[in-house]
């Protein structure tokens, strides 16, 4: 199986993190799927701020995005 690449598209609708308290310390969990520090938010959700309602976007590793619907 070496050399085979598996890929999948996952649709995310959240545009911000979810706060979780662990031992009274707040951790911010990425809900948008764009953080490069999963599962924690790294602020990349700000890229979704100008998304238009009803449209679907694909985000690329280089930081760009494409409207796909
Ligand atoms: S919620 Fe995903 S980067 Fe902040």
Image (cartoon, grey):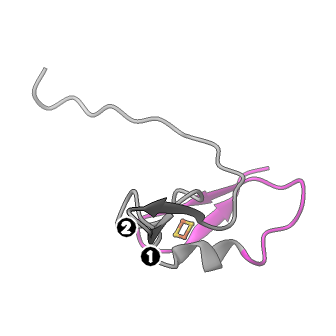
Spot occupied by residue 5 in the image (x, y as percentages of width and height): 27, 34
Spot occupied by residue 22 in the image (x, y as percentages of width and height): 41, 60
Q: Which residue is mark 1?
A: 42
Ligand 1 under 8 Å from disc 1 Cβ: yes
The residue range painted magenta reads 49-69
The answer to whether 33 is drawn above or below residue 41 in the figure is: above
Magenta includes 15? no
Q: Secondary structure at mark 2?
A: loop
Spot occupied by residue 39 in the image (x, y as percentages of width and height): 40, 57
Front in this rendered view, residue 23 or 40: 23
Q: Is residue 67 left or right of residue 60?
A: right
Mark 2 is surrounded, within 10 Å at the Cα level, by few (under 14), some (14 to 19) or many (20 or more) other residues, namely few
Q: Which residue is mark 2?
A: 36
Q: Are marks 1 and 2 in contact (CB under 8 Å)?
A: yes
Furthest-right residue in this view: 53
Task: Name the image quarter holding the N terminus.
Answer: top left
Front: mark 1 or 2? 1
């Amino acid at each position: 199986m070496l050399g085979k690449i598996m890929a999948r598209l996952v649709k995310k609708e959240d545009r911000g993190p979810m706060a979780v308290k662990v031992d009274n310390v707040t951790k911010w969990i990425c809900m948008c799927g764009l953080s490069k520090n999963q599962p924690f938010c790294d602020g990349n959700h700000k890229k979704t701020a100008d998304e238009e309602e009803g449209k679907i976007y694909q985000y690329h590793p280089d930081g760009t995005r494409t409207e796909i619907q």
